[in-house]
Amino acid sequence: MPMKTLITALLLSAATVTASHAAPVDQYGYKLPPSMQSKKKAKKAPVKKAAPAVDYTGEFVNFGDWKEVRAFLDDIATRDGFDRAELTTLINQVRYVDAAVQLVKPAPPGKPKNWQAYSKLMIDPVRTDAGIKFWNDNAEALNRAESLYGVPAEIIVGIIGIETVYGRNTGRFRVLDAITTLAFSYPEAPQRRERMEFFRGELEATLLFARQSGTDPLSLKGSFAGALGMPQFMPSSLMKYAVDFDGNGKIDLLNSPTDAIGSVAAFLAAHGWQRELGGPPVYAATVSPNHAWDSLLNQGLAAKYRIGELSAAGVTSATPAPDQLYGLVDLQNGAEPTEYWLANANFFAITQYNRSYFYAMSVVELGRTVRLARGAAAITPATSTGASGM
């Protein structure tokens, strides 16, 4: 083969490879889900060993001797009517969990945020396939939750998928160990005192929930921060927002997908989800090079700006966005260009579940990916043949 022809062939081959790695997007700027892109042969996953009952070895530190612990127990015994001697017996069985302390420490400075890397971890074929099955198995509950609370099924599916892969990874920390450790031994941080107060409230809520439900508080398992069940509700959220959506007389976020679905929808409705907004929670945006829009960033977890204000600052949507209030969301991609999105009030309702743009966007993307993949799977060859024969 002549050298010029060989070089041309190599360049064309490289261009083809590059194009195959560029994920196409739809009219709103979302990447198309994996099911609608070219597939690569998946590697066979290695066989995993069975997970241990808990994710740590707790250390006995005799919390009952700590002055602040004793004062806390005195307080809730008076306020909530707990038996003080029983609280002492209980706290003497609680263990200190260093793993929880290490896991709540902030990430070391200097490492750039990368939305594309994050999204690849959170929106993958495992979650997509599990999401299709979860949706199919619980379609009635999802439809009922959407009708009652106004929260689309795909958003509920997105949250439960991101949180626990539909109940597969609900956590193996004893909730009482993790929360007590963080309530009284939170690591050094700018808001250490406030965080300890938060976890003391969660400890009280854990004990109240256990008493109300007739559950041994030491039997509760969850995340390193004490979050429980398929939707990973903190104990106080469980007490305030969880619902008995299957109507069996008890709330079970661990074993009842129906309760989990209804509770997620109830939480979002209570935190600002607006059914009347309709459409997607975010729209892909472009920003002008003059940076007049800089002042619109980091203005809290709320939609504050009209389309006219955004446009005047040099922010436009890839497709016409409805005349609603929006916030300007920046999703950083390390050394690659930052993505910008217009986010409405429903996007910011999701951030009340987890105060992170990355988290909220992953919920939106996963829910949408599962919806599209589920729809594609429903188009069977028989259906296609029937349609073409009409």
Image: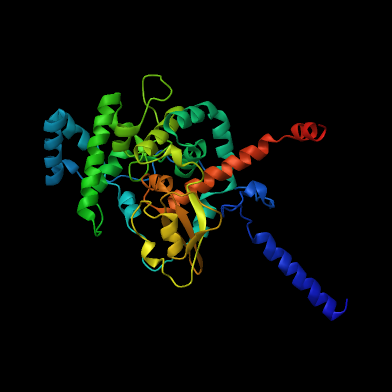
Q: Based on the displayed image, in which of its 4 quarters is residue 254 positioned?
A: top left
Quadrant of the image containing the C terminus? top right
What color scheme is it? Answer: rainbow
Q: Quadrant of the N terminus?
A: bottom right
Using residue 330 as the reference point, say whether residue 197 is left or right of it.
left
Q: In the figure, residue 384 lies in which quadrant? A: top right
**Relative vertical location of residue 76 with respect to residue 22 in this rendering, above or below:** above
Which residue is more in the foreground, 278 or 214? 278
**Viewer-proximal residue among 84 and 360:** 360
Whether residue 291 is visible here, answered yes or no, is: yes
Query: Where's residue 187, x and y in %?
Result: 26, 56
Q: How many marks?
A: 0
Residue 43 shown left or right of residue 188 in the figure: right
User: Residue drawn 13% across and 32% down?
Assistant: 79
- Looking at the image, the residue that sits furthest to the right is 1
Q: What x and y, as percent, mark residue 231?
A: 42, 38
Residue 257 visible within the image: no
Q: Residue furthest top?
A: 248
Relative to 303, say whether 378 is above or below: above
Q: Nearer the viewer, residue 93 or 81?
A: 81
Question: Can you tell which quarter of the image residue 252 is in?
Answer: top left
Residue at 40 percent of width and 19 percent of height: 248
